[in-house]
Amino acid sequence: MSADGQRSLTRSTAAALAAAIVAGDVTALEVTNAHLARIDEVDPAVHAFLYIDHEGARAQAAAIDAKIAAGEPVGPLAGVPVALKDIFTQVGIPTTAGSRILEGWRPPYDSGVVDRLREAGCVILGKTNMDEFAMGSSTEHSGYGPTHNPWDLERIPGGSGGGSAAAVAAYEAPLAVGTDTGGSIRQPGAVTGTVGVKPTYGGVSRYGLIALASSLDQAGPVARTVMDAALLHAAIGGHDARDSTSIAQPVPDVVGAAHKADVRGLKIGLVRQLMGEGYQAGVSQRFDEAVEILRELGAEVVEVSCPNFEYALAAYYLILPSEASSNLARFDGMRFGLRAGDDGDANVEQVMSATRAAGFGDEVKRRIMLGTYALSSGYYDAYYGQAQKVRTLVANDFAAAFDQVDVLLSPTTPTTAFKFGEKLADPVAMYLNDIATIPVNLAGNCAMSLPIGLAPEDGLPVGLQIMAPAMADDRMYNVGSALEAALVNRWGHHLIEEAPAL
Ligand code: GLN
């Protein structure tokens, strides 16, 4: 295929690719090959992927083409390539969760998300890089080296799902699936100029998702447009009996809402606690401008107060390590991946200890220790118990706010993408990236990050967060789509098209 042909396929939206493939204008194999060629070309610099499944992706694409040629029914995203965060199991494909402790492990079963992707007809290109066990905001905690932000290769792509966001931003894939436990879809979305959505907790199956903090973990879509995110959300969402917290209701009509794109008469609340002090000037400026656009589009904008959000970060960094310390106990050198110190004489405890010492990185060890401490007898009530009370207060703040307004807005992150190494030595500085994203995870409702422009001081993307009540995911797609249309109309293109060519 010509370079122009390849370029136009990799620049297409998922919606356009799906339509072209089913109409026979292009084959799924051509689309897959164009993306694989793009990955081979730019991924040495970006390092979004931990594993590229050239052969498997081509076989999936050829199978879709055969079905279309035979006139058999195909799924709504037939032939559309997708990148998968390396935290989801996929039969026979190396799955590491960014950790050396899982190096060489090939899962014997598909995750719920992979099942849904296959039903939708998606072609899975490979596995994307992430902070180890999804702990981090920069991918610098990956056991396999960081991912680079396509806007500036010296900067972080966010985390933990920096690989998924960078793959989409660098046109290596039109779609990616991430997971968001405290912001790992939305924060990378914000700093790479892509759309990232954390669905309502229970909205997408956690079956086969390697657990970080089970009461917070949620899979969701990454895309370059709101409509593409909606299409992927609809494809992966819905009930799965194998996940005990899966919601037994259909996914709200997110695609219909993305088509609607009408905010007239909608009531929008700006969260006082998630604005102003501590936010980069250019982030606040773009945020204010976006709010003004929504006003012009006919929304009513008010300020609301969620006083307990001030304590959300602290509560999260007790609840998450507590759950993680329990979940990660399964990595013991006996069942999966790495086994160290097994010299024939060593006892079980010595092998476990050597395996964990060699296989886990510093951030993972830090959180296991924090969590074990927070759960230990004598401290349980003071730390874990208190944090759970704060969690309830945060949920109450959301409930009170949603009595007054339809959606809530804030900047997604306090700053644009920072440079490698800037926050690595200071865990609390790293944790503060999630100040605006964490309340939603604690309460279990849904949120989207949408690119709204470049910060004037550094020319880097800024994200706006739209938060909606649980099972009102459609609402944030309606608002996101309306704002995106107004911005694209103003700029004459999507923001991502301003990213420097790689
Ligand atoms: N940065 C957050 C953390 O380190 C978010 C993690 C996530 O959403 N997986 O915990």
Image (tube, helix red, strand yellow):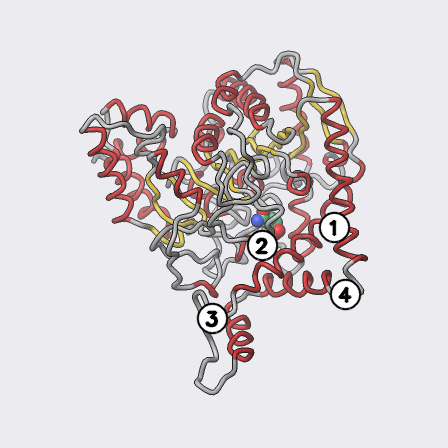
- What residue is rendered at 74% in x and 48% in y? 388
Q: Foreground: 27 or 288? A: 27
Q: Which residue is mark 4?
A: 377
Name the amino acid type tagged 1. Ala
Give the amino acid at mark 2.
Answer: Met
Front disc: 4 or 1:
4
Where is residue 201 shown, x and y percent of the image?
59, 39
Amino acid carrying label 3: it is Met
Q: Is residue 493 visible?
A: yes
User: Which callout, 3 or 1, points to the residue nearer the camera?
Assistant: 3
Rounded to the nearest angstrom, the CA distance separating label 4 from label 3 is 28 Å
Per the image, label 2 sits on a secondary structure element best described as loop
- Horizontal and vertical percent position of residue 142: 50, 58
Q: Residues within 10 Å of mark 1 (few under 14, many from 20)?
A: some
Residue 314, labelled with which disc? 1
- Looking at the image, residue 266 sits to the left or right of residue 340; the answer is right
Q: Quadrant of the C terminus?
A: top left
- Of residue 375 and residue 267, the one placed in the foreground of this image is 375
**Residue found at x 38% / y 40%:** 82
Q: Which residue matches tag 3?
A: 334
Q: CA distance from mark 1 to mark 2?
A: 15 Å
Q: Nearer the viewer, mark 3 or mark 2?
A: 3
Mark 3 secondary-structure assignment:
loop
Residue position for label 2: 135
